[in-house]
Every structure is written in structure tokens, then in C-alpha cells.
């Protein structure tokens, strides 16, 4: 068989070691040798001796979405083999979390992660507003975290003398040592999101980086049965 479809650009290559790799701009490959975690429904292909199990639906088994408080169900993948993960053809990225690091991320952007990482659902400080505030997941430990993003993300440095204001629907995550609070701006609200109402941004202070997607949250698609 010949043609561009079967070129080396598209044909997958065998993994050289266990762990997470970016297969292409839209897909992450995970060479499993033991255990890893992923969002339910994100597996698009696998080979080898792998078992997929739903993780319990208690607090420990869910990553909460910002604002809505909805849960993102997880699954555990065990065994030996290769699995590919993707979500709605969004762009994928891998974050290396080292010992002592901390990365706060919106649950809707989580694709998969090493079992060596720990995560805890926390309310974003300063966001105690109607509807329960903003919920994000804080990842710690040592390992890799696979993320999805609609489009190419913006990684904006935050410095002590220059805070950054981010649309709450667009924020993907941020690094440790950043302080958060909500900032309301009527004047900005007149120019954003349809031009009506009061705009609310997440203000980040300190030293680090904030990751933003170049689009606002869209309505969730209905589940197919």
C-alpha cells in the first residue's frame, strides 16, 4: 500500500521505554508497564495486554471542572502494552512535573497522567462566588501529565510587579507560588464576551506562568447513547 497516508509521518513507531510520549499534535501515546490514569473515553487505540477500569466516582476518582462543579471521570489502565489517547482532536501537550513542583490545572484539560503523580481537588483561592467558586486539580509528585487544549495555548509569564488577568473560561492552569483572586471589571466587560454584563477575571500575582487557551469554554456536547 502506498500514498501519503502510509508515510513515516503517520505510521506510529514502537516505544523505546515505558511512559508518555506525544505521538502527534492531537494524540498522546502511553507505553504502559504497570499502571497509569486517563480520562474515561479518551482511549482511541491500544495493543498489548491492557485492562481498562473505571476509577471510583468519589472525590478521589473525579477531577472537577471549573465553575460548573461537574466531575471528569477517570479510568485506570493496567498491564503491559501501548495505548493512544486523544480528545475531540484538541492539541496535546506533556508537562514534566518534578519533585517539589506543583501544577494547578482545570479538569477539562486533563488527558492522562502517570500513576506516580498525586492530585487533589481544591477551590481556587479568592473565587468563593455563587455556584461554589472555581475548582481545579493540583498535581504534585514526580511524573508526566498529558493535557489537551483547543488551539495552541498561550504561556504568559507572571512577575511580582505585573499581575496577569485571565478569563475564567479560558484558563488552563498555572504554576506554584502564584496567588489568585477574582477581579471584576465593568469597563472590560463591555468589550468582552458579547459586550454585556460584568466581566470577571482570575488575577494571578507572584512569579511563575499561567497557561491560557485561545478560546472560551463551549457548551458540552450531549452524550451519545
Image: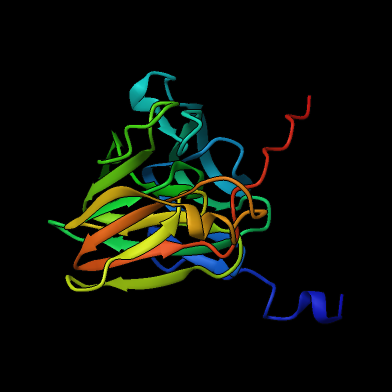
Identify the residue at horizontal 44%, vertical 46% (top origin): 80
In this image, 195 relative to 92: left or right?
right
Q: Is residue 221 above or below residue 218?
A: above
Residue 129, horizontal then vertical, whole percent: 37, 32
The answer to whether residue 140 is above or below residue 165 is above
Q: Name the image quarter holding residue 2.
A: bottom right
Q: Nearer the viewer, residue 134 or 185?
A: 185
Q: Residue furthest front?
A: 187
- Residue at the location (80% across, 74% down)? 5
- State the image quarter where residue 207 is shown: bottom left
In the depicted structure, whether residue 132 falls above or below residue 137:
above
Compared to residue 160, the image places residue 182 above or below, namely above
- In the image as oriented, which residue stretches furthest toward the left? 100
Which color scheme does this rendered protein use?
rainbow
Whether residue 116 can be seen here: no
Quadrant containing the C terminus is top right
Residue 119 found in image quarter: top left
Q: Quadrant of the N terminus?
A: bottom right
Tell me: 169 left or right of 33. Answer: right
Percent position of residue 147, x then y = 47, 56
Instruction: Pick whichever, 39 or 122, lies toward us.
Output: 122
Q: Residue at x 43, y 33 (%)?
A: 64
Q: Residue at x 16, y 58 (%)?
A: 177
Looking at the picture, how far across and down is residue 137, in whole percent?
A: 34, 41
Residue 82, horizontal then vertical, whole percent: 52, 53
Q: Is residue 224 visible?
A: yes
Amino acid at each position: 500500500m502506498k500514498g501519503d497516508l502510509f508515510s513515516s509521518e503517520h505510521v506510529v513507531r514502537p516505544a523505546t521505554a515505558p511512559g508518555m510520549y506525544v505521538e502527534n499534535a492531537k494524540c498522546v501515546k502511553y507505553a504502559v508497564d504497570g499502571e497509569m490514569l486517563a480520562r474515561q473515553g479518551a482511549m482511541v487505540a491500544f495493543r498489548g495486554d491492557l485492562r481498562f477500569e473505571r476509577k471510583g466516582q468519589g472525590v478521589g476518582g473525579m477531577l472537577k471542572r471549573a465553575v460548573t462543579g461537574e466531575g471528569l471521570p477517570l479510568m485506570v489502565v493496567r498491564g503491559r502494552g501501548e495505548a493512544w489517547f486523544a480528545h475531540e482532536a484538541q492539541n496535546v501537550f506533556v508537562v514534566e512535573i518534578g519533585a517539589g513542583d506543583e501544577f494547578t490545572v482545570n479538569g477539562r484539560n486533563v488527558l492522562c497522567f502517570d500513576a506516580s503523580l498525586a492530585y487533589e481537588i481544591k477551590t481556587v483561592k479568592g473565587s468563593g462566588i455563587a455556584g461554589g467558586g472555581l475548582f481545579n486539580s493540583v498535581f504534585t509528585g514526580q511524573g508526566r501529565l498529558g493535557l489537551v487544549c483547543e488551539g495552541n495555548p498561550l504561556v504568559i509569564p507572571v512577575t511580582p510587579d505585573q499581575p496577569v488577568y485571565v478569563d475564567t473560561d479560558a484558563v488552563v492552569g498555572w504554576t506554584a507560588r502564584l496567588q489568585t483572586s477574582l477581579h471584576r471589571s465593568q469597563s472590560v466587560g463591555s468589550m468582552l464576551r458579547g459586550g454585556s454584563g460584568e466581566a470577571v477575571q482570575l488575577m494571578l500575582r507572584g512569579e511563575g506562568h499561567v497557561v491560557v487557551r485561545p478560546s472560551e469554554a463551549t457548551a458540552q456536547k450531549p452524550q451519545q447513547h
